[in-house]
Image (cartoon, rainbow, N blue to C red):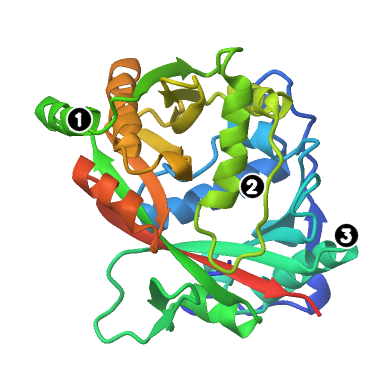
């Protein structure tokens, strides 16, 4: 979502001077060389990087060029559109629209960003209108978007509570005000957290010992990048559960259909994008069923940071410390596999107190807050 800033912006020329055009991205799967990054895509990447450096002081949250080349062409499960706004030859903003194709086909993901010196001149409104029109013409009736803010709003700031009943954002922050002004409702707030690496070995040992005392009927397994053939069907079933069991508040996100083919396509896309992954999982000894998993990813272009992706324990197997066990096991693996990594970044719904408690026990510290917004089209 847009993050306007009134300071030091030039006057906007005539409305027809703003040109919003689709960014042409080469088909996914080609050689991952910098020459394939078009001028327009490079401008979009530069805008994202500048925004993240200004807000966070790092590029941990930003797609690498290689990831962007893999992501933006889309795939058979999701169509993705990226648009660049220019005034004359100067890039001034971007917007994007993501359209699920196999499930959640009434929804569209919307994102808007404006270059700081051009904010508060109607460019964000124009970009949002463009993105919403694309979604509407594709028959989408529910729009979702997000923005992430650092910790510690100003003292005495007015706060907007999420409709989930847990978490809030500063009402007067420009991004919050922009979303509210354009009819978006704050459905959920997620907390981002960061864990310093390495995790002390004695802490991991203690947490693992406590966990194993409650998990006699389970065994741990793990893999890198490619799920073993004998587990992929069970892994796909857990990916379905991830789409239904994780808290989503009032967002219009419904069940995603995963099978072995979708898992393999996801793994291949990560690999082509230069992303390496480590998965730790739990098996039920009696049935051999895969019942829990967690994923960490690493990118050579951002060597100091890991991203904690999904973590799920099937509801009927909760209460056995499996969430802690798979996370601890995966942290051990990751520290050996990617020694340059110095931290792990993750996100959790504010109402997901159980997972937040696991993260806190491992040493994660709050790093920011992310608003999840929804707008239904009439």
Mark whose residue sits in front, 1 or 2: 1
33 to the left or right of 357? right
Q: Residue at x 65, y 81 (%)?
A: 182
Q: Quadrant of the N terminus?
A: bottom right
61 to the left or right of 322? right
* Element assignment for label 1: loop
Q: Which disc is residue 317 wearing?
A: none
Q: CA distance from mark 1 to mark 2?
A: 53 Å
Q: Which disc is residue 138 wearing?
A: 3
Depicted 151 relative to depicted 46: above or below:
below
Residue identified by numbered label 1: 213
Residue at the top extreme of this rendering: 229
25 to the left or right of 293? right
- 10 Å neighbourhood of mark 1: few (<14), some, or many (≥20)? few
Which label's residue is closer to the chain start, 3 or 1? 3
- Residue 97 screen position, x and y as percent: 73, 56
Q: Which disc is residue 43 wearing?
A: 2
* Element assignment for label 2: helix
């Amino acid at each position: 979502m847009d993050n306007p800033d009134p300071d030091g912006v030039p006057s906007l020329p005539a409305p027809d001077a703003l040109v919003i055009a689709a960014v042409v991205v080469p088909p996914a799967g080609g050689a991952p060389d910098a020459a394939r990054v078009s001028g327009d895509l490079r401008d979009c990447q530069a805008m994202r990087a500048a925004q993240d450096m200004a807000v966070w002081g790092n590029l941990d949250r930003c797609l690498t060029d290689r990831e962007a080349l893999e992501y933006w062409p889309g795939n058979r499960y999701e169509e993705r559109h990226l648009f660049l706004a220019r005034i004359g030859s100067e890039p001034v903003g971007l917007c994007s629209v993501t359209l699920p194709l196999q499930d959640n086909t009434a929804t569209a993901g919307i994102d808007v960003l404006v270059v700081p010196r051009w904010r508060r001149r109607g460019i964000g409104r124009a970009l949002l209108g463009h993105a919403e029109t694309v979604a509407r013409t594709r028959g989408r009736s529910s729009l979702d978007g997000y923005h992430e803010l650092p910790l510690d709003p100003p003292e005495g700031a007015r706060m907007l509570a999420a409709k989930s009943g847990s978490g809030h954002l500063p009402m007067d922050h420009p991004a919050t005000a922009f979303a509210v002004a354009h009819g978006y409702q704050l459905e959920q707030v997620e907390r981002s957290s960061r864990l310093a690496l390495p995790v002390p070995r004695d802490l991991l040992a203690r947490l693992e010992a406590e966990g194993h005392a409650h998990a006699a009927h389970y065994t741990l397994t793990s893999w890198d990048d490619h799920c073993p053939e004998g587990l992929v069907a069970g892994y796909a079933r857990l990916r379905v559960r991830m789409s239904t069991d994780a808290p989503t508040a009032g967002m219009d996100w419904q069940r995603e259909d995963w099978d072995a083919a979708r898992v393999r396509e996801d793994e291949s896309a990560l690999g082509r994008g230069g992303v390496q992954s480590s998965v730790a999982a739990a098996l039920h000894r009696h049935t051999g069923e895969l019942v829990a998993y967690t994923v960490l990813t690493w990118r050579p272009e951002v060597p100091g940071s890991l991203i904690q992706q999904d973590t799920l324990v099937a509801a009927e197997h909760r209460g056995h410390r499996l969430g802690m066990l798979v996370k601890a096991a995966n942290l051990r693996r990751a520290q050996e596999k990617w020694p340059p990594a110095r931290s792990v970044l993750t996100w959790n719904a504010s109402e997901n107190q159980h997972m937040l408690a696991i993260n806190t026990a491992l040493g994660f510290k709050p790093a920011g807050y992310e608003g999840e917004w929804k707008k239904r089209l009439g």
